[in-house]
Image: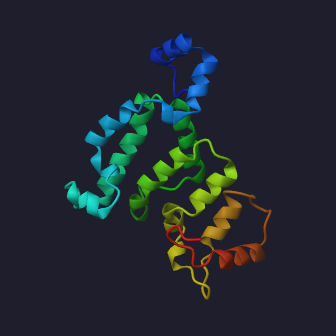
Amino acid sequence: RTAIGASFVVADEIRRVGVRAWLDAQFRPDAIAKPFIATARSKYPAIWNTTPAADTKAGYGGISEGHMAEQLMRVHVLRPVYTKRHLQTTMADFWLDYFSLPFSENKMTGSARQLDALARTMAFRRFSDVLVAFTFSTGMLTYLDQYGSTRVHPTENLARELMELYSVGVGRFTETDVKAASKLLSGLWGGTR
C-alpha cells in the first residue's frame, strides 16, 4: 500500500533490499533518484518555469493558463507511473486531495505549481504544519478570495473553510467563531502573516 501500484520493478527492489530498508528509503525521498523529473521538464516545461521572467526567457511567456493546467494534470497522472518516490507521491496526493483546490479553475492555474510542490515538500509533516503551510499558500488564499479581505470588510471564506472542512468540522463552531476568525485573518495575502 505504500507503493503507487504493484509492479515487478517495485517487487524486485523490495526483495533485493528488504521491506524495512525499502520503507526507510521511502521516508527519505530526497535520497531517491528522480528519473521522472528530467522527462517531465523537457516534455512539460511550463510547469517548472515558475516566474514570468523565467517563462519569457524560456519562450513560454505566451503560454495560456489552461495549457499550463493541462500540463500539470498530465504530470500528476504520469508521475506515479515513473516515480521511485512512491510514499512521498502517495502522501502528496493525499494532501492535494484533502485540501482539494481545483487546478482547472482559471484563477488557480498560476498557483497549481506551487501547491503541487508544497504537497511534496510537506508530505511527511505533521497535520498542523501542513494546515498552516496550505493556509498561507497563494493557492489557498486565491481560491478562497482572501485578497479582498480587509479589516473593515473581512471575507469569511477562509475562516469558514478552515474550520468546517480542514479542522474542527461541521457543527463544532458558531457564526461568531467564523466572524472572529475572519477578522483575525483579514489582510492576509500572498504568504504574509
User: Would you say residue 1 is visible in this rendering?
Assistant: no
Q: Nearer the viewer, residue 63 or 193?
A: 193
Tally of numbered discs: 0
Quarter of the figure with the N terminus: top right
Left or right: 132 in relation to 57 = right
Q: Residue furthest front?
A: 31
User: Would you say residue 139 is visible in this rendering?
Assistant: yes
Q: Is residue 182 above or below residue 97?
A: below
Question: What residue lies at 43% left-to-right and 59% top-to-bottom?
Answer: 111
Left or right: 98 in relation to 117 = right
Q: Which of 67 and 21 is in front in this view?
A: 21
Quarter of the figure with the C terminus: bottom right
Q: In this view, does 82 lie above or below 164?
A: above
Q: Is residue 155 above or below residue 160?
A: below
Q: Quadrant of residue 169?
A: bottom right
Question: What residue lies at 63% left-to-right and 45% top-to-bottom?
Answer: 125
Q: In this view, does 59 lie above or below 174?
A: above
Q: Where is residue 182 in the image (x, y as percent from the top left)?
A: 66, 76
Q: Where is residue 151 in the image (x, y as percent from the top left)?
A: 62, 85
